[in-house]
Image (spheres, helix red, strand yellow):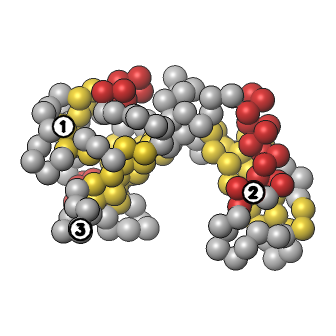
Amino acid sequence: MNSLIASSYDATKGFFLPASRIYGADGLTLEALSAIGIIVVGDKTAAGFRRCMLPEGWTPVAASESTMQVRLQDGQGRLRAKIFYKPGSQGGGASMQLWTRFTVQLKTSDDAQWAEVYDGNELIHTTDKGAKTVDKLGFTASSQPQYVSAESWLDSRWPDHKNPLAYWN
């Protein structure tokens, strides 16, 4: 399904985004996305979507992880949002997770771990390595000392980095 949605995108006709279930910041609405160039042009459909015009250069891309996910990438190939389609599920409809410009990822080897800070797709900071203590599935990643150190480094330079509408322009 995601490859069909992505391949049929026509920038002149816009793209249907979920009208609710927008994650990334509390109380975020589609109208608030005008701060990053998304313009709402249609009323809410019965299925809970609104037609929106995406900024120039943005494209929907099929996600390899799931046939129910489409990713929005900007003109520089940076991830801006993940849209999850759930047709026929109990909750039905779709949801959208907005991405921030800066992200932290905990990396591991067989015996070590470190954190990396990214500006879009570009690595901009790496912490020192420490002994690997994260659980196998990574559930404790954000509480690891290297991750906390990377977040602190990011906080000191871009204090609003957790806001998906900040720092993109």
Amino acid marked by disc 1: Arg
Q: Which residue is mark 1?
A: 51
Q: Which residue is mark 3?
A: 90
Q: Earlier in the sequence, mark 3 or mark 2?
A: 3
- In contact (CB < 8 Å): disc 3 and disc 2: no
Distance CA(mark 2)–CA(mark 1): 39 Å
C-alpha distance separating marks 3 and 2: 33 Å
**Residue depicted at x 37% and y 44%:** 22
**Which quadrant holds residue 28?**
top left
Crowd tier of the residue under label 1, counting other residues whose Cα lies within 10 Å: few below 14, some 14–19, many 20 or above: some
**Residue 168: x and y, percent?**
53, 28
Q: Nearer the viewer, residue 73 or 145?
A: 145
Q: Which mark is residue 143?
A: 2
Q: Quadrant of residue 74?
A: top left
Task: Specify whether 52 is left or right of 35.
Answer: left
Is 19 situated left or right of 71 in this image? left
Helix, strand or loop at label 1? It is strand
Q: In the rendered structure, which disc, 2 or 1, sits on the residue that comes first in sequence?
A: 1
Q: Residue at x 14, y 38 (%)?
A: 44
- Residue at the spot x=89%, y=53% of the render? 128
Q: Quadrant of residue 17?
A: top left
Could you tell me residue 90's position as x and y percent? 23, 68
